Image (cartoon, rainbow, N blue to C red):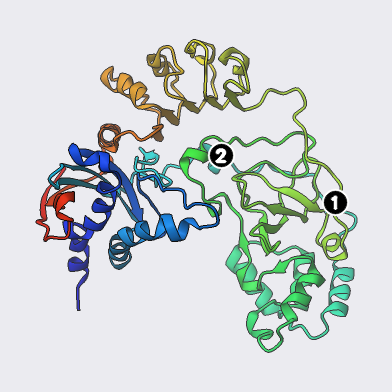
Amino acid sequence: MVDQRSRSSLLYDFATWTPVLRFLRDGGEEQAAHSIRVAGRVGRGSWSLPRQRQSPGFGRAFLADGMRDEMKAVERVRRVLADTGVDDVTFTAEISPAGKTELRLFGTSPAVEPGLGSPHPGTLILVEDAVPRPWLRLPDPAPGAVPAPSADPVLLERTLRERLPEAVGATETEIAAAEARLGITLPEELKALYRVTRARWEDRVDDHTAAERECKAVGCELFALEDLYIAEASSRHCLWKFAAMEAVVTPPDAAVQGVVGSPGWIVFGDNGGGDRLAVDLTPGPRGHTGQIIILSHEENIGACLVADSLTDLVMGRRSGRRAGSDGDRPPAVAHVNIRSLPSIEAAAHPGLEVLSVGVWEAEPLSLSPVMELPRLRTLAAYPGTLADPLEIAGLTALEFLELGPEEWRVLLDAGAVPRSLSAAAITVHGTRDPLPIVGLANELLALWDRPQIIQTVLEGDLGSMARGGEEAMDGVSGDRE
């Protein structure tokens, strides 16, 4: 039996990576005359290798013509990753014409989020356990909110018993146990629903159509009573890079508050497509206590109104009310680019929280219009769009900053990286060598004394292309940096 330590050592064995390196090295005849540098990523579920796939020709699939060799090349690494429990590894390699190779493997760091398929580092978490500000926002109190006139637990229970005469309902003891687990009193409509059916799989295991009947009767795929959960912000996972670009906004005429999650959102079902239905006990200014909302799996924040009450959902009466409108109030999230706002001046206002500067074809922009804004917490600027990166030092409330490598270099050299940051990201476009980007990331992590991205250097011999590349390899593990 191979122990965990031995399996882990296989990841740092040059032979494990030889098929991948040969696949990349042998990808073009023009590469045989000089050394080449390659970079990529191999994960248990996916991989990214810098070799262009040839068109398979009319009527032929990429899987047959363009993918078979690639899949075979990464198979050994993926198997070792699975055995060792490692999700993925980023690498760079320099390969000489004779086959002498220096391979660098970049380890993971608890302070770095995944790079989303890129060989470059993901978001750097500079403060341990930090979360973006929208994920800390609780819903506003709604002391005047009341249930909708349509809410009728008696009608709801009677209707469901007629539709589901064979269902096994929950006892009062089981309902009380669910309330104790959740730390919340279930609304009467939800109790009435589960008194009719507790929606357990084992109650309907011998009835293959029971789940379908239940879905039609209720209006959604119903969760078992013990699977109810509270959709607090922590239940809605989102990478920092995207979460930092969100803002909590609840218009004065909104039925649903624009928060990430709420201690009053009780999730009880699914629409069959991954979107969750919840009873809302913390409605917006124009909402009803106990209204039914849906949390989209494609959205990071907010929810949409489905029905004014659970009774309405069961009776098939969907709400016709529209989402609230901010009217003329300027947005908390502003995008300045060739297709959106024409300048940073146009984005600036006291309520601005997030500024994104995207693709820009005119002269680089000054940040002076947003210098005094009290709520600006996120700045993401496309490489080359800022006239003077050092202006960022004046943005003292930033919690997230995303810049290109050159802009970060300016800040680091000047000692001007804002100390208010909780997270940071390095925007890299194209196929730039990951090595200097990892070095830059480690410099930023070091400012907060955070765990570094460890590099392992391996040396080996792939053999020359002319020799067919099938002879033995020499693999030597070098230093970790």
In the image, residue 366 above or below residue 306 = above
What residue occupies the far bottom of the structure in this picture?
206
Residue annotated with mark 1: 319
Write the residue at 82% across / 61% down: 313
12 or 474: nearer the eye?
474
Quadrant holding the N terminus: bottom left
Which residue is depicted at the point 45% across and 61% down? 64
Question: CB atoms at circles 2 and 1 under 8 Å apart?
Answer: no
* Amino acid under disc 1: Ser
- Which tag, 2 or 1, sits closer to the chain's start? 2
Quick check: 393 left or right of 324? Answer: left
Q: Which mark is residue 134?
A: 2
Q: Residue 125 at what x, y percent from top left?
A: 37, 40
Measuring from the top left, give residue 405's x and y in whole percent.
34, 27
Q: Position of residue 42 (x, y in %)?
A: 34, 53
Mark 2 lies on a secondary structure that is: helix
Which numbered mark, 2 or 1, is in the foreground of this view?
1
Task: Name the outermost residue toward the front.
Answer: 58
Residue 13 visible, this orientation:
no
Tag 2: amino acid: Pro
Quadrant containing the C terminus is top left
Q: CA distance from mark 2 to mark 1?
A: 27 Å
Asked if 421 appears above or below 204 in the picture, the reply is above
- Residue 438 visible in this rendered orientation of the protein: yes
**Side of 60 where 349 appears, left or right:** right
